[in-house]
Amino acid sequence: MAPAERRPFDLAIPASNGLRRGRTTGTCATAAVKAALHLLLDGELKREVRVSLPDGVHYLVVPIMRVRRQGERVRAEVLKDGGDDPDSTHGATIFAEVARNDVGTVRFFAGRGVGTATAPGLRVAVGEPAINPVPRQMMRQAVAEVAETDAGFDLTIGCEEGETIAPKTFNPRLGIVGGISILGTSGIVEPMSLATWIASIEVYVRVALAGGPARVAYLPGKIGREYARDVLGLPDARSVQIANFLGDALDFTERALREGGQELEELWLAGHPGKLAKVLDGYWDTHSSRSTMAMGGVARVAAEWGYGPHTVRRIEEANTVEAAMEILNEAGDASAFWREMEVRIGALAHARVPSVRRLEVRLFDLAGNLLGARP
């Protein structure tokens, strides 16, 4: 759907926690690509552009800082605004340099400050610029909207001071070298990782527990939402988005139940092991700036479960939990292993909420597939 047929997404409307939303690095890069294309193809100097969001319904108006020609290329720059989320890239300049090519396709390149993947298990192949699939699709959409032709373009995406910003992220551990990643699945930054959001989680928890329901579910992110709705049969009010704050959410739950003299029959934790498995190493705030990556805990359980030293070492050295999943699939009996992980995570979590009678964990991969599939 072209922008003219979409509805505007208004960043002035705060998120449900009262905080200001922002735009992802993927949205910023797409806006820069679009502005550069307008000057390259039409001679138009745009001060703002409409970026089609991945939901297929909305567009976002993004201001352009600067556009200029550089020989046969055009460079455009956009300010990264992460809203009220404490994003490492907030305030950075994301730029795109766009040029025609004679191969008839859109090609992506890492400019200064954007990293390159050097290890397997990421969302992009080894040797590719660290531009995730959704931002790539957004940029292809932008090309189609402006160019209206099959002619090819080279898109070089960069970030001013990206080399300095990258060490504040997990990129060095992930095997991404040279700068930041261009990320985003919705195009919008939801302000979730703030102290203010922690306070709002307590409100959401108390709302979920109101009326004495038999079960509620806590979700670190969007993964697991369909399971809570379709399998557990929970309405939205009984499924709490807890972001990185699992420990706080459990403590709020215990406090609310004790205050009301209640017990909760079932509490479900559903999400990706990249978040939930961090509790195996004692991390209850799973934000990347306040915890280590989860592979160490996964590897330790794998060793105790009986996988060989070679497999355990490969898991320890994996750059992502998704890569560890592939290793475990190769080694065999992966479903049973992930069920064991669910049991161990559940036991640790249950110890924080003794007023809950039963606590269950379900782990999913990034595609939403249940890892510990039941026989």
Image: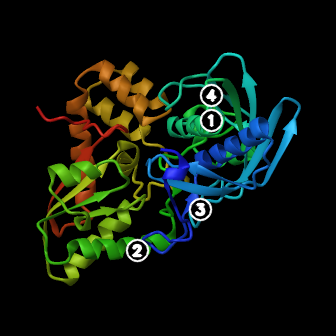
Residue 70 location, quadrant: top right
Q: Earlier in the sequence, mark 3 or mark 1?
A: 3
> Which element carries disc 4, helix, strand or loop?
loop
Q: Is residue 122 left or right of residue 90?
A: left
Q: Earlier in the sequence, mark 4 or mark 2?
A: 4
- Nearest-to-viewer mark from 4 and 2: 4
The CA distance from mark 1 to mark 4 is 9 Å
Return the disc, 2 or 1, that comes first in the chain's sequence.
1
Is residue 354 visible to us here? yes
From the viewer's perspective, is 18 left or right of 76? left
Which three-letter amino acid code belongs to the residue tagged 1? Val
Q: Nearer the viewer, mark 1 or mark 4?
A: 4
Residue occupying image coordinates x 21% and y 45%: 343
Q: Residue under circle 3? A: 86
* Residue type indicated by callout 2: Ser
Label drawn at residue 149:
4
Viewer-proximal residue among 355 and 163? 163
**What residue is disc 2 on?**
200
Classify 10 Å Cα crowding around label 2: few (below 14), some (14-19), many (20 and above).
Answer: some
